[in-house]
């Protein structure tokens, strides 16, 4: 394979971390298909216990890079939680999460959900959960739900869904030392690692959760819960995980960084090409114990374009997991800005920030420049086409305004403060 411009890797032995979730697939595929080796990289990959351990591993150099929550590089860079300058040159996927409730809660919700032909009408809004939450609260019982990490997409998606249905998910006040996120909460959200979600639900410790696959479908297979909505229905084609590295790593090893992105781009394309034809093979890879380690059938349920809600209610969701279509891998500034608006909305960012602050922070963390270099190499290598990527000469890094949210509020990444003003529940100008 000939290489266009990029020099030899400055560091060729690398270790990458991941959490046992379907959307770590680009790393597994790049490894199994030899794409890392094509770039002269000798990579080992290792599952991590939880998102904090993974982040700390990247910060202290035990890991050279990792599958990360989109909020992690942003939060680390602004110093919410652990402070460190993390960047992302590659967005790993779109969609891929769901919200599941226990069987008991589902039975209570059902009386409020419109039905058609004996089946619930989708999308199922949190409006139908509100009377249930109110009943619990009137009986003095806190309504508890799980999400995977305070700066996870799952936390923001669950909060978005709840707030759109008039349920307050609580505020953070880090300037007062309060990082529980429970201030004014009508639904109390707490952290549970993804693989432990089904067991925690079954034990009755939480009544519902938001998580990535395969842990929603696992609840269906075990008969312990019902997924009610996918994140695709909360925000169509929302960005999910990213590949994170320290800024220091990318500056010390620029060729290595570009080659890593090249390998991941090839893997992402392989995952989506020919209308997802390679997905069964990908599922086989992921079901191995060193990757996700869930049953083939559980992983296949969502990876092959279907999603089962209530047992037997299987629906087509061809875009449940997107790895390459719709420029899924491009690190858009507007994606970063959305996550920052949600951090501000719920008080993780204590005070109001200017629009410029949002743009500057996004540009510190999201690195489309590195991405574009890798993409141009692949085009020059004849491995990919220019049409696989945004037009680098005119791309601003901001998507056009996005309209397909469950509350029908339009998001324009160029106007973060105006967007926050439009959301009924959430902080605007005030500091708690």
Image (cartoon, rainbow, N blue to C red):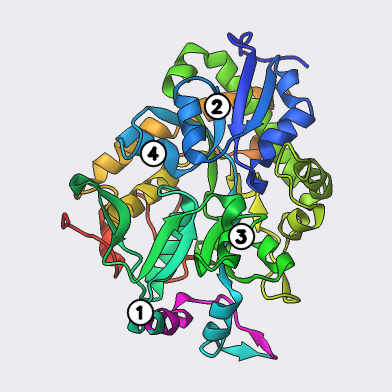
Proximity of marks 1 and 4: CB atoms separated by less than 8 Å: no
Q: Residues within 10 Å of mark 1 (few under 14, many from 20)?
A: some
Q: Residue at x 56, y 60 (%)?
A: 200
Q: State the SS at label 3.
A: helix
Check disc 4 and report the residue beneath it.
74
Q: Residue at x 74, y 45 (%)?
A: 293
Magenta residues, start to end: 117-134
Q: Nearer the viewer, residue 218 or 427?
A: 218
Earlier-in-chain disc, 2 versus 3:
2
Q: State the SS at label 2.
A: strand
Earlier-in-chain disc, 3 versus 1:
1
Of the numbered discs in the image, which one, if any, rests on residue 137? Answer: 1
Q: Nearer the viewer, residue 281 or 330?
A: 281
Circle nearer the viewer, 1 or 4: 1
Mark 3–mark 1 Cα distance, whole angstroms, equals 24 Å
Proximity of marks 2 and 3: CB atoms separated by less than 8 Å: no
Q: Quadrant of the N terminus?
A: top right
Check disc 2 and report the residue beneath it.
65
State the image coordinates of residue 193 (x, y, percent, origin top left): 54, 49
Q: Residue at x 72, y 76 (%)?
A: 313
Earlier-in-chain disc, 1 versus 2:
2
Circle nearer the viewer, 1 or 2: 1
Q: Quadrant of the C terminus?
A: bottom left
State the image coordinates of residue 62 (x, y, percent, origin top left): 53, 21
């Amino acid at each position: 394979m000939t290489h266009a411009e990029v020099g030899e890797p400055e560091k060729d032995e690398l270790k990458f971390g991941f959490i046992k979730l379907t959307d770590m697939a680009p790393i597994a595929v790049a490894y199994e298909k030899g794409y890392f080796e094509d770039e002269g990289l000798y990579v080992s990959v290792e599952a991590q216990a939880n998102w904090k351990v993974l982040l700390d591993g990247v910060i202290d150099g035990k890991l050279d890079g990792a599958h990360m929550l989109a909020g992690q590089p942003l939060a680390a860079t602004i110093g919410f939680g652990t402070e460190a300058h993390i960047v992302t040159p590659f967005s790993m996927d779109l969609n891929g999460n769901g919200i599941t409730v226990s069987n008991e809660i589902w039975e209570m919700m059902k009386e409020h959900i419109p039905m058609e032909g004996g089946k619930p009408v989708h999308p199922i809004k949190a409006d139908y959960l509100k009377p249930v939450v109110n009943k619990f609260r009137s009986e003095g019982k806190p309504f508890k739900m799980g999400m995977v990490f305070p700066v996870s997409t799952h936390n923001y998606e669950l909060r978005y869904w709840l707030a759109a249905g008039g349920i307050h998910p609580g505020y953070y006040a880090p300037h007062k030392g309060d990082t529980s996120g429970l201030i004014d909460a009508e639904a109390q959200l707490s952290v549970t690692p993804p693989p432990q979600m089904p067991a925690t639900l079954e034990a009755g410790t939480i009544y519902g959760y938001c998580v990535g696959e395969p842990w929603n479908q696992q609840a269906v297979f075990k008969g312990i819960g019902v997924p009610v909505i996918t994140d695709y229905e909360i925000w169509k084609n929302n960005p999910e995980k990213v590949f994170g590295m320290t800024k220091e790593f990318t500056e010390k090893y620029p060729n290595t960084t570009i080659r890593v992105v090249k390998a991941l781009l090839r893997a992402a394309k392989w995952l989506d090409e020919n209308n997802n034809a390679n997905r069964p093979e990908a599922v086989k890879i992921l079901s191995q114990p060193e990757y996700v380690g869930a049953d083939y059938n559980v992983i296949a349920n969502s990876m092959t374009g279907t999603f089962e809600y209530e047992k037997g209610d299987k629906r087509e969701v061809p875009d449940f997991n997107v790895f390459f279509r719709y420029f899924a891998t491009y690190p858009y500034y507007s994606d970063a800005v959305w996550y920052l608006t949600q951090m501000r909305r719920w008080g993780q960012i204590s005070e109001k920030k200017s629009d410029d602050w949002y743009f500057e922070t996004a540009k510190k963390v999201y690195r489309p420049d590195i991405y574009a270099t890798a993409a141009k190499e692949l085009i020059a290598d004849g491995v990919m086409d220019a049409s696989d990527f945004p037009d680098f000469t005119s791309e601003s890094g901001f998507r056009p305004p996005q309209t397909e949210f469950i509350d029908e509020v339009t998001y324009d990444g160029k106007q973060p403060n105006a967007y926050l003003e439009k959301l009924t529940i959430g902080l605007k100008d005030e500091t708690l």
